[in-house]
Amino acid sequence: MATKHLQIHHVIMHSPGPKWLDGVDFREQPTVDEHVAYYSRLSEEGNLFEGGPFLDSSGGMMVLSAGVTKETAEQLAQADPTVIGGLLVAHVHPWLRAFTS
C-alpha cells in the first residue's frame, strides 16, 4: 500500500550530448566512468537520494536529496565531468515526491 509522503526534490535529467556515440551502449560510452564516480561522491556526501540510467540508452535521472536547493542542483548538474565534456546534457526539474511504498 502506498503512503503519502510529500517531499520536494530536484531531479537532474540526463540526455545524450554532442559527444554521445550513437549505437554504443551507455556503459561503453567514453568518460561514463567519470560520471559514475561523480555521482558516487555526491551520494557519499548525502546529496544524492537515488538515480541511474534509462536502459534504452536515452539518458538517465538523478534524484537529489530533499533540501538541496535549485541553485545547488543546477551547480551540481553542470559540474558533472560528462556534462562539461559534452557526453551528456543535464536539465534540473523540481519534483514533488508525493508517494512512497
Image: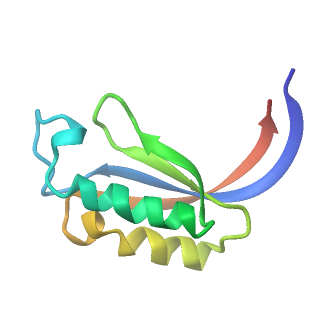
Total marks placed = 0
**Where is 16 relative to 71, above or below?**
above
Residue 37 occupies which quadrant of the picture?
bottom left
Residue that appears at 11% across and 39% down: 22
Residue that appears at 47% across and 47% down: 61
Query: Foreground: 78 or 25?
Result: 25
Residue 9 occupies which quadrant of the picture?
bottom right
Query: Foreground: 80 or 11?
Result: 80
Residue 28: percent from the left, percent from the top? 16, 41
- Looking at the image, residue 73 sits to the left or right of residue 58; the answer is right
**Where is 84 relative to 35, above or below?**
below
Residue 42: percent from the left, percent from the top? 51, 66
Residue sticking out furthest to the front: 44
Render colour scheme: rainbow
Residue 56: percent from the left, percent from the top? 31, 28
Query: Foreground: 90 or 2?
Result: 2
- Looking at the image, residue 48 sits to the left or right of residue 89; the answer is right
- Which quadrant is home to the N terminus? top right
Residue 80: percent from the left, percent from the top? 35, 68
Residue that appears at 12% across and 36% down: 24
Residue sticking out furthest to the top: 1
Query: Foreground: 10 or 41?
Result: 41
Residue 82 occupies which quadrant of the picture?
bottom left
- Which quadrant is home to the C terminus? top right
Residue that appears at 74% across and 50% down: 96
**Where is 18 relative to 78, above or below?**
above
